[in-house]
Image (cartoon, helix red, strand yellow):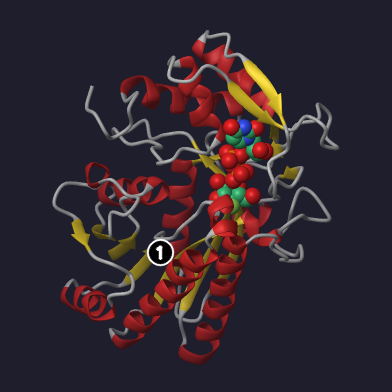
Amino acid sequence: MRVLLTGGAGYVGSHAAGMLHRGGHEIWVYDNLSEGHPQAVPEGRLIVGDLQDGPKLQTVLREQQIAAVMHFAASCYVGVSVTDPAAYYQNNIVGTLSLLDAMRAAEVDKIVFSSTCATYGVPEIVPITEREKQDPINPYGFTKLAIEHALADYSHAYGLGYAALRYFNASGASEEISIGEDHTPETHLIPLVLQVALGQREDIKIFGDDYPTPDGTCIRDYIHVDDLATAHILALESLEPRSQLRLNLGTGRGASVLEVIEACRRITGHPIPATVEARRAGDPPELVADARLANQTLGWQPRYDTIESVVASAWKWHQAHPHGFGQVE
Ligand code: UFG
């Protein structure tokens, strides 16, 4: 299939791009490189462009005879979304509406959209099913939820087929090719802990140990980025005009911050000093997916089902690329 991946130079997008490319699909990555890395894109497949450049998007969709879009391009820092909501509403909502308009004009009627567990806010029932109320607690979550609503409305009115994939904590790195997680600034737990093991950081700060969880630290569902990529491809292949899929993507197993640090200690052999700090604003105590619907709908099953396997794959990438894409080792 001829697929355009917006944000395909970013973390999750580049893993999906690599997997599609290796699977023989004809792909194009459309990315403004504000966060993405050109080195992460398969050779010769990058088009540098902005979501808000509708005419350019339309030209690309038409000229490359694109059949479907995977839409990864977005701003995705929860904390920044609170201090600079304007950027989030612009990039995530205005940018996506521009993409959807270009798709309508070019008669492209299938899209797989990167949504998030942040659309649930603080869930009442964990593991979280897709029936849980979506009640975000930060602008990032609001922007993603707004687009889920837009997709449903466009599907009813214009026949768009879509899958909104609600990721839990994307983590790990591809074992097939040399891509992995490299954010600036880095705020995610696993890469930060591994930076301690690499000697780039003195210790890891634990944001709160007084949560209502067994060890007092927050619990998350760390889903491997290649498992996310697989789910995107399965969703894409299942889409028909007017399809409406809303699916959680997680392992169904939670790991606490302390358990993640312990796993990193075991995998790296480094003592990884940790200090407890105050809670970080906006962190729900526990986010774990009930991902049975994705299994029933797509036959999707995560291959990386332990925190150790996820951390081990991330560690391979960080050892080989201690400075991410910035410096080839
Ligand atoms: N944490 C620490 N110390 C750190 C960094 C993180 O203790 O230095 C903790 C956080 O407080 C949280 C857990 O580790 O409890 C995971 O934090 P991350 O920043 O790695 O991930 P988040 O759960 O905050 O964010 C993820 C995705 C977002 C998504 C969000 C939904 O990265 O895109 O889940 O809550 F929106």
List x then y, in percent, for residue 263. 60, 20
Residue located at (18% from left, 71% from top): 64
List x then y, in percent, for residue 177. 29, 34
List x then y, in percent, for residue 73. 39, 60
Q: Is residue 222 visible?
A: no
Residue located at (22% from left, 42% from top): 39
Q: Nearer the viewer, residue 307 or 256?
A: 256
Q: Nearer the viewer, residue 68 or 276?
A: 276
Quadrant location, ligand no. 1: top right
Q: Nearer the viewer, residue 106 or 190?
A: 190
Q: Is residue 172 above or below residue 77?
A: above
Residue farthest toward the bottom in the current orientation of the protein? 157
Residue located at (77% from left, 42% from top): 285
Residue located at (26% from left, 57% from top): 25
20 left or right of 45? right
Q: Is residue 188 above or below residue 8?
A: above
Label 1 belongs to which residue? Answer: 71
In the figure, residue 301 lies in which quadrant?
top right
278 left or right of 28? right
Residue farthest toward the front in the current orientation of the protein? 83
List x then y, in percent, for residue 248. 62, 55
Q: Is residue 42 above or below residue 268?
A: below
Label 1 sits on what residue type? His
- Image quadrant occupied by the C terminus: top left
Respond yes or no on whether mark 1 lies under 8 Å from ligand 1: no
286 left or right of 84? right
Q: Secondary structure at mark 1?
A: strand
Question: How busy is the neighbourhood of tag 1: few (under 14 within 10 Å), some, or many (20 plus)?
Answer: many
Q: Is residue 44 visible?
A: yes
- Image quadrant occupied by the N terminus: bottom left
